Amino acid sequence: MTIRYKTIKEIKNMISHKEISNKELVQEVYKLINENSHLNAFITLNEDSSLKKAENFDNNPSDSSLAGIPIAQKDLFCTKNLRTTCGSKILDNFIPPYSATVIDNLEKAGCISIGKTNMDEFAMGSSNETSYFGNVHNPWGENLVPGGSSGGSASAIAAGIVPAASGTDTGGSIRQPASLCGITGLKPTYGRVSRWGMIAFASSLDQAGPMARTAEDCALLLNEMCSHDIKDTTSLDENIPNFEDDLNQSLKGKKIGVVKDLDLASLDNNVVEVYENSLKEFVSLGAELVDISLPNLSLSVPTYYVVAPAECSSNLSRFDGVKFGRRSQNPKDLEELYIQTRSEGFGDEVKRRILIGSYVLSAGYYDAYYKKAQQVRRLIKKDFDEAFSDVDVIMTPTTRGAAFEMGSKGSDPIQMYLEDLFTISANLAGLPAMSLPNGNIDNKPIGLQIIGNFLDESSILNFAHMYQTKTNWHMLTPEGVTK
Ligand code: GLN
């Protein structure tokens, strides 16, 4: 009995019917990691402790909701006594003394944290090519990128190694790799999931979320990830529904906003066809399509690339060779210690962001760039508020195309930044959004994005689950196996 490509729901059944012991399950995960080491999806493994936890579940069966479920954790979450690098050389020796709230919540629910997944350095990137620990490969094609920055998490799920992983999304880092690897991933409402213990990139945009094969599994994970956390001042003290309960609501009469202002002409014809086919599928499930306008959508990429670097330049000032991680050897004074540590420890993309961020925040340019970007951000949020007075969810393609070749966008950062054309606006507005597989282009998967209203993850999950009960895209694997 193998757990390869199985969902959480299926693995839970296997455990409860004693078709596999918890220990055998975890052993198989490590075997799969070894057999797929060419994917480079993991930076650090947690084998001894995971096997011990599994044996413990065998000896003392638990009825916690996710007891014994193996999960991969993005290497951006602090994990107590387990190396946490954030994909950077500057943290390659950092062992946190505490775990992020998300990790604690998942482990309390019984998840076994198998290891830490590879990612773009400090979550800056869309292809996993900025990681200090090397590129992650997409299991759908040897030289294809998995997307980023949660590329290791997406690749490990798409290869069927683990049923689930944690991810984080500042401008698309859960949804874009989910789209490129053919899996399902959700970025919750800003504040729904605690950011405590997440290594900060852009604090007003960062949000952790679940990545899995199905919307149903994302609901199971989100149930456990969410909590009101007094250690994160932006954590929302709101009712947390049981996200599993609403998965099967009928879509009859529900309204899907279709964005008139999307520049579909600039997309590959196949992407448009795949997108339009999914809209038809939702109509056949009873939903109605409503044209909506988001007039400031085209400003989301430039707005993000002022706000995110500004926040990153401030957040990353804490990596100075004094408090965390690496320290350069033999500096002649304190200033040289800072300069050398940061010059040696950060990669090029991170340095580019720090430079842009410091520039847009500088006295002479603050009003022209940072203040202006904050004003446009407000307008983008207002567009969504108006649209959601008429519709339940909004749908767009997740990405402009399927997975691209490694190295093909490296020389032009703007091309890479445009990967998040459709995903960034949800972060700027703080809204929940998901990507789920909705087609295949030249044997490469692609995703549909569903954006929901503030705190309404339930509607997104309901739409996605109903779609997955009617279609098979989420069960397609790189080996062509459709269950
Ligand atoms: N690709 C975007 C960036 O590089 C988004 C990254 C993210 O969501 N962490 O900033």
Image: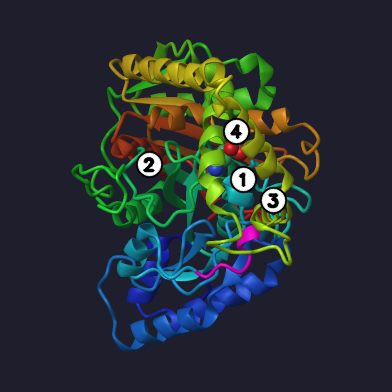
Q: Which of 343 and 22 lies nearest the eye of the viewer?
A: 343
> Which is nearer the N-term, disc 4 or disc 1?
1
Looking at the picture, does residue 352 appear above or below residue 322?
above
Give x and y (percent) for residue 412: 77, 31
- Residue named by callout 2: 188
Disc 1 residue type?
A: Gly
- Residue named by callout 1: 148
> Which is nearer the N-term, disc 4 or disc 3?
3
Looking at the picture, does residue 143 appear above or below residue 417?
below
The span picked out in magenta is 90-95
Could you tell me which residue is drawn at 61 percent across and 23 percent down?
Answer: 272
Could you tell me which residue is drawn at 34 percent across and 24 percent down?
Answer: 287
Residue found at the far left of this picture? 239
Give x and y (percent) for residue 451: 41, 30
- Residue named by callout 4: 358
Could you tell me which residue is drawn at 32 percent across and 28 percent down?
Answer: 453
- Magenta portion: prevailing SS class: loop
Q: Which of 132 and 54 lies nearest the eye of the viewer?
A: 132
Give x and y (percent) for residue 288: 35, 19
